[in-house]
Image (cartoon, helix red, strand yellow):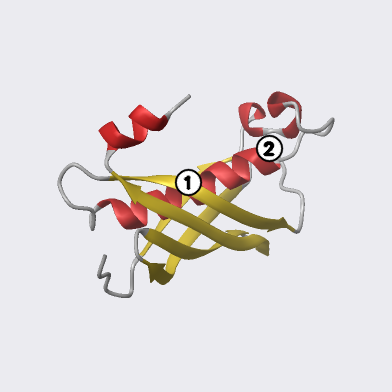
Amino acid sequence: MALQTPLCAQVELVVTEADTAIAFGSGDVPVLATPRLVALCERAAADALRAHLERGQTSVGFRTEITHLVPVLIGSRVTAVAAFERSDGKRIAFNVSVTDRFGLVAAGKVVRVVVDPAVFMEKAR
């Protein structure tokens, strides 16, 4: 798959109680949950790739590596950005970052794989 750079997208979120570690069951404090932060990064990567897929294709998550650096309180606005890094056939890698008004909250990589949804679902268990 030939992709042109820059290929990027951003997604914003105002943190609510539904986005906290308590709500996700991943912790006991009312701050942005790491699983929610990962989902935000995945969404940004999927959004960046979506317009470049051929008809009948979609992308699915393959690998996510995130370092969650600082806690974020309810009511704070965060922005996740996914920027194309490289393509290896159907695997597309993105550098991702999440920021708030104070600076960097998290950073890492997201790899998505381009698939045919029907073929993909046949393999599902």
Depth check, front residue: 98 or 110: 110
Q: Earlier in the sequence, mark 2 or mark 1?
A: 1
Depth check, front residue: 3 or 82: 3
Q: What is the quadrant of residue 7 in the picture? A: bottom left
87 lies left or right of 79? left
Residue 122 rendering spot, x and y as whole percentages: 34, 28
Tag on residue 74?
2
The residue identified by callout 1 is: 61
Residue shown at 52%/55% (left/top)?
A: 80
Residue 82 rendering spot, x and y as whole percentages: 46, 61
Residue shown at 61%/45% (left/top)?
A: 37
* Figure label count: 2
Q: For mark 1, give the secondary structure.
A: strand
43 lies left or right of 3? right
* Comparing labels 2 and 1, the label whose residue is closer to the camera: 1
Residue shown at 28%/51% (left/top)?
A: 50
Residue 38 rendering spot, x and y as whole percentages: 59, 46
Q: What is the quadrant of residue 8 in the picture? A: bottom left
Q: What is the quadrant of residue 103 in the picture? A: bottom right
96 lies left or right of 33? left
Query: Pointer 1: residues within 10 angstroms few (<14), some, or many (20+)?
Result: some
The amino acid beneath tag 1 is Gly
Residue 78 rendering spot, x and y as whole percentages: 57, 51
Query: Pointer 2: residues within 10 angstroms few (<14), some, or many (20+)?
Result: some
Q: For mark 2, give the secondary structure.
A: loop
Residue reaching furthest to the bottom: 5
Residue shown at 18%/52% (left/top)?
A: 54
The amino acid beneath tag 2 is Ile
